[in-house]
Image: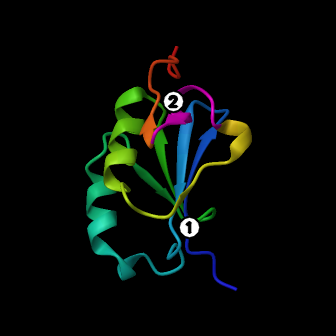
Amino acid sequence: MRDDRIKIINRQSREVAVTLPYAQHPVDNPVHIEKLKEIEGHKWNPEQKCWIFPRSNDTIKSLLDIFKGENVWIPAYRRQGPFSTTGGRANLSAGCCA
């Protein structure tokens, strides 16, 4: 069974990891890839098949804008700080980058 969710994970290393459902075949959606490459500090991790970004409020805002309306999964135990949502909007006031 294929998992078609986009996953945004807040990592302990002060990074954000994004896993796309087509991570094995990134050419399947060049629009997302091009938008992700516009975020400063982006890098592709071929071993984990995910995009890595420095954790900042600007990064979180950019990711939420890129994937607005998409099937995005954020682990419940990590929905604090920049990942908490109210009425479909991200709560970026928690200072994730302190």
Residue 70's place in the image compared with 95, above or below, is below
The kind of residue tagged 1 is Arg
77 drawn magenta: no
Hey, which residue is sitting farthest bottom in the picture? 1
Residue in the picture at 44% in, 43% down: 88
Question: Crowding near pointer 1: few (<14 within 10 Å), some, many (20+)?
Answer: some
Residue 97's place in the image compared with 68, above or below, is above
Label 1 sits on a secondary structure element that is loop
Q: Give the label on residue 5, or none.
A: 1
x then y, percent, for residue 48: 63, 62
Tell me the magenta residue range.
79-87
Label 2 sits on a secondary structure element that is helix
**Front residue (pair 26, 87):** 87
Residue 25's place in the image compared with 18, above or below, is below
Residue in the picture at 39% in, 47% down: 63
State which quadrant residue 11 falls in: top right
Q: Give the label on residue 82, or none.
A: 2
Residue in the picture at 40% in, 28% down: 57
Q: Looking at the rendering, in which quadrant would you find the N terminus? A: bottom right
Left or right of residue 78, residue 21 in this image: left
How far apart are labels 1 and 2 at the CA level? 19 Å
Which color mode does the image show? rainbow
Q: Give the label on residue 43, or none.
A: none
x then y, percent, for residue 67: 38, 56
x then y, percent, for residue 15: 55, 37
- In the rendered structure, which disc, 1 or 2, sits on the residue that comes first in sequence? 1
x then y, percent, for residue 5: 56, 67
Hey, which residue is sitting farthest front in the picture? 87
The kind of residue tagged 2 is Pro
**Front residue (pair 1, 56):** 1
